Amino acid sequence: TLIRGGTVLSSTGAVTADVLVDGETIAAVTAPGMLAGQNVEVDTEFDATGKYVMPGGIDAHTHMEMPFGGTFSADTFETGTRAAAWGGTTTIIDFAVQPKGSSLLSTLDNWHEKADGDCAVDYGFHMIVSDVNDATLKEMESCVAAGVSSFKMFMAYPGVFYSTDGEILRAMNKAADIGGTIAMHAENGIAIDELVARALAEGRSEPYQHGVTRPPELEGEATSRAITLAKVTGSPLYIVHLSAAQALSAVAEARDEGQNVFAETCPQYLYLSIEDLGKPDFEGAKYVASPPLREKHHQPDLWRGLRTNDLSVVSTDHCPFCFKDQKELGRGDFTKIPNGIPGVEHRIDLLHQGVVAGEISLARWVEACSTTPALMFGLYPRKGVIAPGADADIVVYDPAAEQTISAETHHMNVDYSAYEGMTVTGRCETVLSRGSVVVDRGTYHGRAGHGRFLERDLCQYLN
Ligand code: URP
Ligand code: ZN
Ligand code: ZN
Ligand code: ZN
């Protein structure tokens, strides 16, 4: 396969080049026309003139088929990875969820059972550690050996996923020992539960209260505490779904001091706000996720964080629940609304609006959507770059095409879009996963089972 004459993007810039794919990998990146007359047999050719040619997106934070509050997120690994592919994401890293009382390895087996043979694009797992004990800590080593090198913990959701500071300290000690990364959901769940109880007691039960009871200060506090615990233990720390300026300040300060602290944000925090939670007729439930959507003034701070690399990654935290029958479980009690917002399909397009608006550079767009997640989670240079030897995960992106995001046309298995009616500039024209065409000009060519499990190395930013 030859992708001819496109603007090939990387985390360091752009060049006009031809990209030759042989089988599952990239064989050559050459000056335009160099391969003509070189006796190279080409079966399929794509003219990428005027288009970007970029490494396939890596969404390091998705939840397919995730159990939550008695229901499951609505995308299966099959439908979710198909939607990802439509949007130029050719790798997802999902979360295996350890129920309290279960072992990490049986959890990993369960998640393999859900995903293996079903994915349209490549996938890996993080492990959610909810039950810290001697056996679990020992099993963290086996997880790393099995290609699961990152462990998510929760300072939120007491009684469900929550870990105490002591438990976090123990897991961080282990992570420091074995080179694993601790990914943290940093919200002070104990304080939040008090605010929630007060709201319900006062009859404040509508979706907007989800935002009111999870103030940004309690994300800032938890983020600072996680950073302190990581410093004491020497563990690398990755703050997931950072939404608040207070949390960003804590991350920036730690990074300035040279600590191995990293953070991701998500498109919903860059584009949506707590005002959406206040939509009438229970529609606010569509926007219930944790941390909650914030006041708009946080958004310029997050864009600045993306420019300064205090925010290194943009992931979606894709966790779709249908409005009908799922989000509606929380009518009359916002705490019963399953938490999560769909988005795996539109991350790359939404971040491209940041390029269009002059918030971030082209190079930074590619870096935050692909190259950095590859390095952060031990997939580079197999993923995250267009270079000889890398997997041929390639997106031909038309930066001038316009599209309007809508549940009518999206491919995620969910009955609403958080971005309904938003017109964006740019669209994936062709998507290759390990050399196979998955999407081309509006037609889907992928198949469930093409996607392979990725055994990941350790974080590649550690010194
Ligand atoms: O509300 C959210 N974010 N749901 C997904 C689970 C999590 O905490 O990431
Ligand atoms: Zn979380
Ligand atoms: Zn601010
Ligand atoms: Zn999540």
Image (cartoon, rainbow, N blue to C red):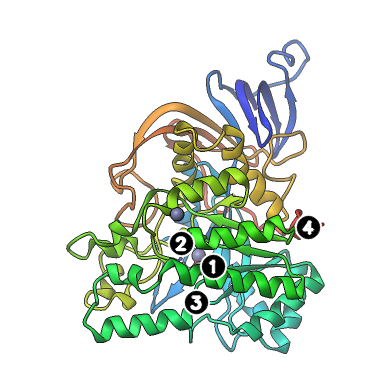
Q: Is residue 52 above or below residue 153?
A: above
For residue 76, the mark is: 2
Tell which circle, 3 or 4, labels the residue nearer the N-terminal end. Answer: 3
The amino acid type of the residue labelled 4 equals: Leu
Left or right of 34 in this view: 162:
left
Residue of label 3: 188
Estimate the spatial distance between the alpha carbons at disc 1 and disc 3, rounded to whole Å: 31 Å
* Quarter-of-image position of residue 362: top right
The amino acid type of the residue labelled 3 equals: Asn
Give the number of the mark in front: 4 or 1: 4
The amino acid type of the residue labelled 1 equals: Lys
Q: Secondary structure at mark 1?
A: helix
Left or right of 123 in this view: 283:
left
Residue 387 at x, y = what percent? 73, 34
Residue of label 4: 462
Q: Nearer the viewer, residue 249 or 65?
A: 249
Q: Secondary structure at mark 2?
A: loop
